[in-house]
Image: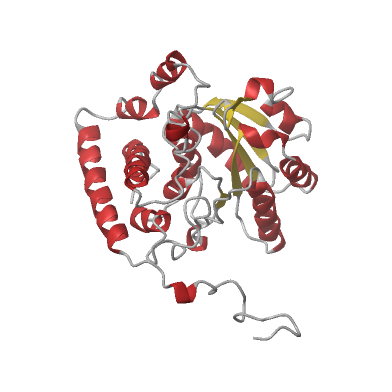
């Protein structure tokens, strides 16, 4: 497990997330992961920087592009990979899959396929912590495509009115699926938050250390009773919105645009902060860990069809009155 309190630990987590996503892409291509994934490659600095500012008791909600958040908050890569494969050894016994992985023991309240929905869940988690007298901060990750979702704006309002310990993190990668944010979002991301009186900061989302510093300040303020905060992390995904794009052959970004952002890759920027040779040693360590994760996940059993209705009801299957069992 990486220690996100050190430069080496943060670099190792960057490499782990990147390697995990590359491994998952290969398993999608082979057909082992069905349905595809939303790759996080390129955005790793946001997950690592924010989670480096969190404490074990703090909670997060994630998105459809959530593997990086889940790993950075401490989830075991072998169990997350098994979850993507739909295996019983997964974090949620293969029932959550790529978009709904969760681990409550680590404060991971779940990735979420509904755009912007994690904001309301994080607000609820923060409210419950206040009611219980617990020092917990909740973080809601979301993309720029969520900025026009009513549920997110309602979450801003409640968090501000009740001065809840919530950090809203907008991963602005410039596109809502294939729609440029520049033609879809009126005003600005930070302006959305500022309208509710929430302190809003823009940060280079390709710089792990910049994200960590901004997140740490917001988390400390929220923990001290200062209310919610908002980070707009300007970042970029190098892969498509979803692996299906490889088949659809969409052309909404130019090669020059992608190459320009590759020059800001957070991994070499993180490696440059380490002593000579340390990054290579960490790369090798991560490669070994991911190889073991792949072996574990692929060896894990598929769920029995007989268990398809398990976990749907608190007391098992309960037919409606008058309906034969």
Asked which colour scheme the image uses, the reply is secondary structure
Q: Nearer the viewer, residue 141 or 31?
A: 31
Q: Nearer the viewer, residue 141 or 247?
A: 247
Q: Nearer the viewer, residue 264 or 225?
A: 264
In the image, taking residue 78 as reference, residue 133 lies left or right, namely: right
Q: Is residue 107 above or below residue 253?
A: below
Disc tally is: 0
Q: Position of residue 101 (x, y in %)?
A: 49, 55
Q: Nearer the viewer, residue 151 or 325?
A: 325
Asked if residue 224 shows in the view, the reply is no
Among the 4 quarters of the image, the one containing residue 12: top left
> Which of the image's four quarters has the C terminus?
bottom right
Q: Position of residue 288 (x, y in %)?
A: 21, 48
Q: State the residue at coordinates (32%, 46%).
A: 30
Q: Is residue 124 above or below residue 307?
A: above
Q: Position of residue 138 (x, y in %)?
A: 61, 50
Q: Is residue 307 above or below residue 228?
A: below
Q: Position of residue 127 (x, y in %)?
A: 71, 56
Q: State the residue at coordinates (36%, 25%).
A: 269
Asked if residue 249 shows in the view, the reply is yes
Q: State the residue at coordinates (64%, 51%).
A: 122
Q: State the residue at coordinates (32%, 58%).
A: 297
């Amino acid at each position: 497990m990486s220690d996100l309190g050190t430069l080496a630990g943060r670099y190792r987590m960057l490499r782990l997330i990147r390697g995990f996503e590359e491994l998952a892409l290969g398993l999608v291509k082979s057909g082992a992961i069905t349905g595809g994934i939303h790759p996080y490659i390129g955005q790793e600095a946001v997950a690592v920087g924010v989670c480096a500012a969190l404490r074990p008791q703090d909670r997060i909600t994630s998105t459809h592009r959530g593997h990086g958040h889940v790993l950075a908050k401490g989830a075991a890569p072998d169990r997350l990979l098994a979850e993507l494969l739909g295996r019983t050894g997964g974090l949620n016994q293969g029932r959550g899959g790529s978009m709904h992985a969760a681990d409550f023991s680590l404060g991971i309240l779940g990735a979420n396929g509904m755009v912007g929905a994690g904001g309301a869940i994080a607000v609820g988690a923060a409210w419950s912590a206040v009611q219980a007298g617990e020092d917990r901060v909740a973080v809601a990750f979301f993309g720029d495509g969520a900025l026009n979702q009513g549920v997110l704006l309602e979450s801003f309002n409640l968090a501000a009115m009740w001065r809840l310990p919530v950090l809203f993190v907008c991963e602005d990668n410039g596109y809502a699926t294939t729609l440029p944010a520049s033609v879809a979002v009126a005003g600005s991301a930070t302006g959305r938050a500022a309208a509710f009186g929430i302190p809003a900061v823009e940060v280079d989302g390709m710089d792990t250390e910049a994200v960590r510093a901004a997140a740490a300040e917001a988390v400390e303020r929220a923990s001290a009773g200062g209310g919610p905060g908002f980070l707009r992390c300007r970042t970029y995904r190098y892969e498509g919105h979803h692996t299906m794009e490889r088949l659809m052959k969409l052309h909404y970004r130019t090669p020059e645009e992608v190459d320009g952002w590759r020059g800001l890759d957070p991994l070499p920027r993180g490696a440059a902060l380490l002593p000579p040779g340390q990054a290579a040693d960490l790369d090798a360590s991560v490669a070994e860990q991911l190889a073991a994760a792949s072996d574990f996940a692929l060896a894990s059993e598929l769920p029995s069809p007989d268990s398809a209705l398990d976990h749907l009801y608190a007391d098992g299957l309960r037919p409606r009155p008058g309906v034969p069992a």
